Amino acid sequence: MNRSLLFGALVLTALVLTGCGGGSKSQHPLTRAAAGSRSDLSPAAAALQAPLASARLRKPLAAAAGVAEPVPADQVFDWIESRYGALMPSQELTQTLDVYKYRYYPATNLYVAIGNGDLFALGAEHTGGLIVRIAAVADFAQQIAACAQAARLDPKGNAVLPAEATEVEAPEDVNEDTGSLAALYPDLDTTTDAFYPSLPCESSIGGTLPPEEVENPDVTAAQEYLSHVESEGGRLVEHLLATPRPALAALGTFTPGDCFMLTEATPAAPAGRVKVDCNDPSFLNAAMPFEGRDIIYVNGLDTGHLFDRIKDPSGPARQEWPVDSSAFLSSAGYFRTTTENYWRAHLIEHLSVPVPSPSWPYAGWQWTATDAQPLYVSKPNRYLLAAWSSNQTIEYAQHALLTQIHLAMTTGLNVFTPPAYPASQVRPFCANGCIVIGHSTGPLITSSAFGRAHAGDFGPGGKQVVASMLAHVSMDGAISGSRISSIGMALAYGIAPIPSASNVICPIADELFGTTNACNANLSFVASSILRDLIPAVSQAVWGPDVDRSPVPTVTIAGGHPRGNQAAGITQLLLPGVDDGVVTMNSACGNPNPVFPGIFAPSGLSITQLVKGFEFSDWAPRLVRGVKIWASQKNLMTVPTPGYLASACTPHLSASGMVMPVAYDWVATPRDARNRYRNHYSFIQSLSEHSYDGGASPLPSLWPSYVGGLASELRQYAPQNVTGVTPVSGINVEESRAVTDPGIYTRTLDANGTRLLKPLDMRVVQRGKKIAFRMPFNIGNCTKQGTLNFRCTRWIWKRTYHLADKWEQKQSSHYVYEFVARR
């Protein structure tokens, strides 16, 4: 249901509440109104008519082609009920009156009827007490015939079948891949999320909602404590906006080096080298990530820096940029070493082995369209690991990042060249453009640094650096900050939680700082750490304008792990909306909408019916997961709007890829889930835990490549529980495409036709339980198998998922390396 239809439906609902009731045949409203039936419509009725009449404008679905007989009235009514739950909130029986088949909905005092092939409605003054024609049933009959039907259930959840049903089969569990999304809907452009309102069928059928969670007084106290702390954040924002930023050395202009191709000696000519334009396509390799271009990695918040600073206040973690630059630039430097440790598993999985070692026999996992199966292919991409200190504020991280890229481009400092790098190529680092990959806090540093450098804040060399950055990939990025940092800052300022709040706050702080008594430790140094900049109000108000100025197109991947695996899942209780344990999807998707507990809810959607938005399942582990996802979707931390849920990067898919029953998408409002910082595009959303894609997650989450596993071994996200129970952890493998802006496909990065993103198809997966039986006539969703012999199916419950192609084996970061920055 689109927005205009929702508003029309709400108006119609309000009107029908004052309409006519039931009665005897002589007094029946349908009989009384029939003599004056008309076809002109009020605006509210026209809003109801529009989606039905528009069905005839779409090409028939392949599954519905060749419908030879009228669609049964019950099937029409069931379909309408499934789509317009606000108007028809109950399952009612079909009744007959004269030429009409009709259903009456007492909750809304509404009649919906079929007569002489037309659909009618009656129930309010907007019809003048007359029957209003909505549309011809034939106009949308093929759409209805393509849609599954729900079984009517008794109070115990058992299917109630027609009296004529025979050969009733046992209910069947379904977990079926029904095919390519693009192939199933060939008349729709399915490359972005814009097609979802055009789908003819409801994605969810049946199921039951979980019981409401009991309010935990400790969590309530922790929320109040944190809200009090954050209410003071406005003063910090005002102070930072009014205070000049630290004076750091400008980066000097430079002349990019030349590029050459080395030639081998032949009988006719000696070996030599030929000067070639650095953007020549001969430097590109379509079989390699990003066409073989150079890569820059920017890690996230490294809690080890905080741990070491607390344990040894005068130790190496106290060193600062740029005074102690060797700690960041030299091979044995403290921050360079921690950066290498941070990315090691990620580099082995996706590129090449950083240090020759028998411990890592495999590197460069892939499963492209030309590969028959998953395999390892060591990649030739050169890369730079940019080191920065979590114990300093973001201005120093920005400068450290740009300086290291500048040095790599001008001198090759700290550029790693793998053995597979083409020996015939001679080109400076980033000569034909670089791809930047950031994780967690890294994307906030990167986008804000690029925005500032583009504006000239870091001198002419900073502008040159940014001009050479082709694309930026944000993995689980804290682009709009993270509320977890507010806890650290509160303790740094000495704002101790009350005893009840400490039961929640202190375990999170202990994990953040690596202590067993963080709430009583001296954390004053944290006030000058990057945690200051990760407070959402600071990230958005102070650094958001710089993020919005970045000229480098940014592709985001976001996680919504059902518990997060951080501090035993406690962090989720304090993060508004869907999150990965550290960062909310609002932040990771690059959404600048303000989120402030008690004032601004997370971006989201209104749904047609609550139960349809819940990932119901008969399989206990998936049901447990669904309950946890449901809890995060409802964790708005403000007065809820009825039927409103926090969303992932698109309102149409949950973090698990389940298609959501959207009634209103809140577009162009402060709750618009599709809103983005300029030049930021969402690509993949998944059930990843925050640390996973960066490679810093602990066992058992490390990739098989890191422990010598075969390429065919399943890649699964961090377990849902700390015990690592296989049936629970093994189901968190889903990824979905979350493209909301078609510009991600048309954005050209160079003169060779490199696009920001290559299209990725999705698979349509149905999970549920259905029942089959035979009837002597067609009641809808029946297959004729002989005279007076129809095999019919009904769904007891169903959920639909749109999952990225090869989702069973790949993970978010794999899609990045295969689909971003490709010709």
Image (tube, rainbow, N blue to C red):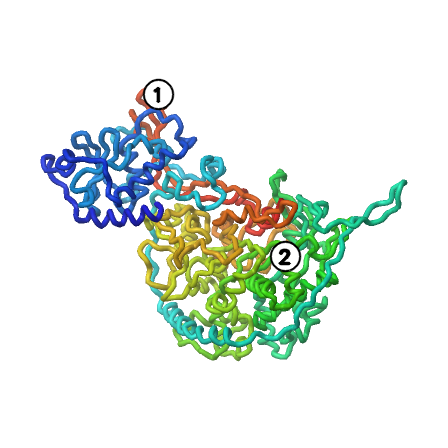
Nearest the camera: 815 or 690?
815
- The amino acid beneath tag 1 is Gly
**Circle 2 or circle 1, nearest the eye:** 2
Q: Is residue 388 left or right of residue 113?
A: right
Give coordinates of residue 814: x percent, y percent.
59, 49
Give coordinates of residue 211: x percent, y percent.
33, 55
Q: Classify 467 as above or below 711.
A: below
Q: Could you say which quadrant of the image residue 170 lies in?
A: top left
Crowding at dot 1, Cα within 10 Å, few <14 / some 14-19 / many 20+, comes out as: few
Q: Classify 686 as above or below 601.
A: above
Check disc 1 and report its element: helix, strand or loop. Answer: strand
Q: Is residue 256 left or right of residue 320?
A: right
Label 2 sits on residue: 469
Crowding at dot 2, Cα within 10 Å, few <14 / some 14-19 / many 20+, comes out as: many
Decide if residue 503 is in sight here.
yes
Looking at this rendering, what residue extends furthest in the left direction?
26
Nearest the camera: 83 or 753?
753
Q: Could you say which quadrant of the image residue 185 lies in?
A: top left
For the N terminus, the image quarter is top left
Label drawn at residue 786: 1
Residue drawn at 53 percent across, 53 percent down = 717
Check disc 2 and report its element: helix, strand or loop. Answer: strand
Give coordinates of residue 417: x percent, y percent.
73, 55
Disc 2 from disc 1: Cα separation:
66 Å
- The amino acid beneath tag 2 is Met
Give the mark, 2 or 1, whose residue is nearer the N terminus: 2
Residue drawn at 58 percent across, 50 percent down = 816
